[in-house]
Image: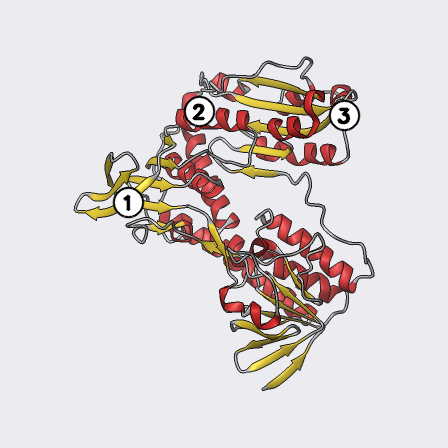
Amino acid sequence: MGKRDFDLVVIGAGSGGIATAVRAARHGARVAVIESGIIGGTCVNVGCVPKKAMWLAAELADARELASEVGFDASPGGLDWIEFVCRRERYIENIHASYRQRFESLGIELVAARGRFVAPGCILAGDAEFAAPHVLIATGAAPQRPDTPGAGLGIDSDGFFGLRAAPRRAAIVGGGYIAVELAGVLQALGVEASLFVRSRLLKAFDEETVAVFGRAVRARGVDLRIGRDIAGARREDDGYVLTLDDGEEMRGFDELLWATGRKPNSDALALGTAGIRSDRHGYVRVDEAQNTNVAGVYAVGDVTGRLALTPVAVAAGRRLADRLFGGKPEARLDYANVPTVVFGHPPLATVGLGEEDARRLHGDSVRVYRTRFRPMLAALAEREQRTFMKLVCVGDDERVVGIHMVGAGVDEMLQGFAVALKAGARKADFDATVAIHPTASEELVLMSEPGMPFDGAMA
């Protein structure tokens, strides 16, 4: 077919690639998107979207028990996985269809092939070459298993979404977002879940908040084992057997799920052919404006190794398109103070600096406010589960530089408070805001005195 010319060629039709392509096309650019897999990438197909669907199912299971405890005639029952998965997949196919319609309406060409560089501004895909002055790498990342005997057994996080029935007893290996979230979903849906964490749970988060979260996870029934590395795994007649680093064996798991990190999808891109630099792990190196070392070649999203969050990839891609085609030469993503939620049971929500990082940066000028309380519904059900909230403030004017929460509903609370933090709000601004009563979120504007650290004992 020879060489075809565009203004922008995007390699990868995940969230970051699609967002960039759509924004560029709306600015009038001629765009081709090269994707050998399913449109939507990790987030839509084996990430945030189906994960959140399963989390919602787990929340409904807990809500049924809670309703029964407060007086409703609602006997808890198991989830019909086949029925729910069918609904989940229909929802995802609707997203696929909306992407295709958007591409068609904007004249974006979707090329179903694997792409690789043959020159800095030229991509070979199938039997054609696609040339453009601007090329975006947005190929994402994939699950990675450890170099451990037996690591080929069981499933990874992608495989979780292939389940069509709940296992009876599951071992989850890992200590990051994915491991924590899937362990919580499984436990809430009636599975005996054991979570094995090699070192620290949720390493990048505020330590005190993680300690509170860990105790809450245990209280929900997850067998959380921190500081336990897996030396090997094997399959026997009664299920998977895990050998721990001290020689202890745990057996009888009918599912084994590895959530031990991700690796960038960069090996097949022939980056060296175009002189594009990557680090020793394969992540494409970019500067603050998403530029690689090669002029006209850019990268966004998980393939860069920077804040592997879908909204980050989307925001970075849109700003890149604005800079290249929208007449905004200074447009770029500010990676500071990005809010995020771990959709565990309960959820953990955070934005800004943890206490440790704040003290390293600002020393004795840091003041910390904390509160712990029992939400009304938990109290009505006579449950002991608590919500934890923490504000990290800096300077004489107590600028809020960190907000950290664990508990029911904090996933929905954080967005508005993240705007306040990003805008430079002070503790006095929180104090001056009238509380909405009775809510859990009001506690964030009612903290009057700096609190002593909790021991994390949150039932």
User: Between disc 3 and disc 2, whose residue precedes?
Assistant: 2
Q: State the separation of the CA atoms marked 1 and 2.
A: 27 Å
Query: Hey, which quadrant is residue 251 in on the image?
Result: top left
Amino acid identity at mark 1: Gly
Mark drawn on residue 352? none
Q: State the separation of the CA atoms marked 1 and 3.
A: 50 Å
Amino acid identity at mark 3: Arg
Residue 288 lies left or right of residue 17; in this view the side is right
Residue hosting label 2: 215
- Residue at the image point whose x is 64% and y is 32% from the top: 353
Q: Quadrant of the C terminus?
A: top left
Closer-to-camera residue (241/434) = 241
Residue 276 lies left or right of residue 318; in this view the side is left
Mark drawn on residue 232? 1
The image position of residue 187, as x and y in percent, is 37, 35
Q: Is residue 164 above or below residue 443?
A: below
Mark 1 vs mark 2, foreground winner is 1
The image position of residue 68, as x and y in percent, is 40, 25
Which structural element holds mark 2? helix
User: Between disc 1 and disc 2, whose residue precedes?
Assistant: 2
Residue 98 lies left or right of residue 431; in this view the side is left
- Residue at the image point whose x is 63% and y is 77% from the top: 130
